[in-house]
Structure formats: structure tokens, C-alpha cells
Image: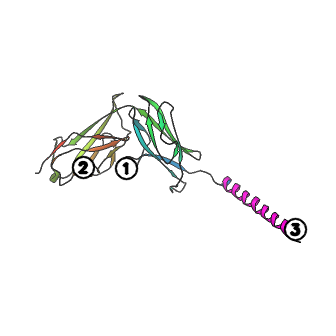
């Protein structure tokens, strides 16, 4: 009787293992990544999603991948696989949510960065070139009067290699380093932004922006009281 009971217990255990295994296999087969999406962001000052990049030779840029399911919910603990054109450079981590790209290319237009997760991927075209960034105030006078209210300011981005305007890159206006407030924290080249100088400003001020992970600073503008 004891042997029969032991045999029955072993049979029940094997049945449970096989049954659980089949359930796991079924779950794997049922799960798919349809509707999932990946976005890639530059994590300088603000986390801003990007669709293309112009990077300087030798630059290091911090990137973050965000994965959303079909309902738009952000998934957690889902490191992606990072890859890039072999000539472009290398990553600090090849499988991670966050990574740093180290650019080794000297120049070129036909590069890419790719983030992949579960067969879903996001490809970012990359150009390696230096940028010439210029600032313009409206009105043009370089004296800023805080009591006069908001000033209009814009940034123009020119690729030095091709001497053409870069209208795709995102300008991030760094209010953390610029005393005052901006109407928008992002614009494109040639788009006006509103700048309200801090009431306590005195002497001079510079405006700070981040473009493709690099910081650019305006000339010094004189600050005076009305």
C-alpha cells in the first residue's frame, strides 16, 4: 500500500511539472510585442525625445530608451539592446535603459543609432559635424531691462561642414543656468522664444542652451534698470 501511495505521489508531481511547463510555454507563445514602441531621448537638463542627431567629433552623449506597450504604458526594468554604425563609435553599455555613446568618427552623414527590444526597434539617423550657433534678441539692442518685461530670443544653428541650417535639431533652453524664465523649454533653429529676465538681474547675463547634448552660451548682454 505504501509503494502504491508513493507511486501515486510521484505521478501527481510529474503531472504538475508537465502541466506548469505547458502553461509557461503557452504564456510565452501568447505574449508578443505588437503595439510596443521605443523612443530615444537625450538626457541633458531635460529628457527630450529625438528623431535625429548632429554630433561633434569626439563627443559623448547620454541616451535613454523608453518602451511603451500598446496602451501607452511605460514598461519598467526593460533594458534595450543598443547598436550603431561601426564607424560612428561605441556605447558605454550595449544592453541597458541608459547608455553613453562615444563618437569616434571625424565627420559624415550616413550614420545611425538603433535601440531594439523584443523585435521592436527605433533608428536615429546621425550626422557627425560641428555646429555654429548664434543668438539673436528682439529688439536688437543688447541691453536687457528686466522691468520692461519679456524679450524675444532665437537661436540659429548652422552646420559648419555644409554651411546649411540645421532645422531638425532641438534647442533646449536651460532655465537652470539662465536667470529668469522661458515661454518654452524647446524650440528649433530660427524659432523665437520668449525670455523673461529675473527681476534681480544686474550687470550682465548670458543665455544657455543645450543642442544634441552640447552646451552653447550667448554673448554677454548688459542688464540695466529703467
Question: How far is mark 3 from mark 2, CA to CA?
Answer: 86 Å
Give the mark nearer the N terminus: 3 vs 1: 3
Numbered label attached to residue 3: 3
Which image quadrant: the N terminus? bottom right
Q: In the image, which residues are magenta?
A: 1-28
Give the x, y percent position of residue 175: 28, 50
* Of residues 52 and 27, the one drawn nearer to the viewer in this rendering: 27
Give the mark nearer the N terminus: 3 vs 2: 3
Numbered label attached to residue 87: none
Q: From the viewer's perspective, is residue 101 above or below residue 8?
A: above
How many residues crowd around disc 1 within 10 Å: few (fewer than 14), some, or many (20 or more)? some
At 40% from the left and 49% from the top, the residue drawn is 47
Left or right: 173 in relation to 79: left
Left or right: 11 in relation to 194: right
Left or right: 17 in relation to 165: right
Question: How far is mark 2 from mark 1, CA to CA?
Answer: 18 Å
Numbered label attached to residue 46: 1
Give the x, y percent position of residue 184: 31, 50
Amino acid at each position: 500500500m505504501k509503494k502504491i501511495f508513493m507511486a501515486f505521489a510521484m505521478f501527481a508531481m510529474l503531472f504538475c511539472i508537465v502541466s506548469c511547463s505547458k502553461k509557461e510555454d503557452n504564456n510565452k507563445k501568447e505574449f508578443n510585442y505588437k503595439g510596443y514602441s521605443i523612443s530615444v531621448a537625450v538626457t541633458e537638463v531635460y529628457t527630450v525625445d529625438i528623431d535625429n542627431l548632429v554630433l561633434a567629433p569626439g563627443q559623448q552623449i547620454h541616451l535613454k530608451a523608453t518602451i511603451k506597450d500598446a496602451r501607452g504604458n511605460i514598461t519598467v526594468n526593460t533594458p534595450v539592446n543598443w547598436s550603431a554604425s561601426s564607424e560612428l563609435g561605441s556605447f558605454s553599455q550595449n544592453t541597458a535603459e541608459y547608455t553613453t555613446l562615444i563618437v569616434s568618427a571625424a565627420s559624415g552623414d550616413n550614420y545611425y543609432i538603433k535601440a531594439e527590444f523584443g523585435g521592436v526597434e527605433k533608428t536615429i539617423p546621425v550626422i557627425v559635424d560641428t555646429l555654429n550657433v548664434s543668438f539673436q534678441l528682439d529688439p536688437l539692442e543688447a541691453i536687457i531691462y528686466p522691468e520692461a518685461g519679456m524679450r524675444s530670443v532665437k537661436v540659429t544653428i548652422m552646420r559648419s561642414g555644409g554651411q546649411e541650417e540645421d532645422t531638425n535639431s532641438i534647442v533646449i533652453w536651460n532655465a537652470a543656468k539662465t536667470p529668469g524664465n522661458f515661454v518654452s523649454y524647446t524650440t528649433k533653429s530660427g524659432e523665437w522664444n520668449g525670455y523673461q529676465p529675473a527681476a534681480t538681474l544686474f550687470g550682465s547675463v548670458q543665455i544657455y542652451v543645450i543642442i544634441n547634448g552640447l552646451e552653447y552660451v550667448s554673448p554677454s548682454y548688459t542688464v540695466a534698470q529703467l
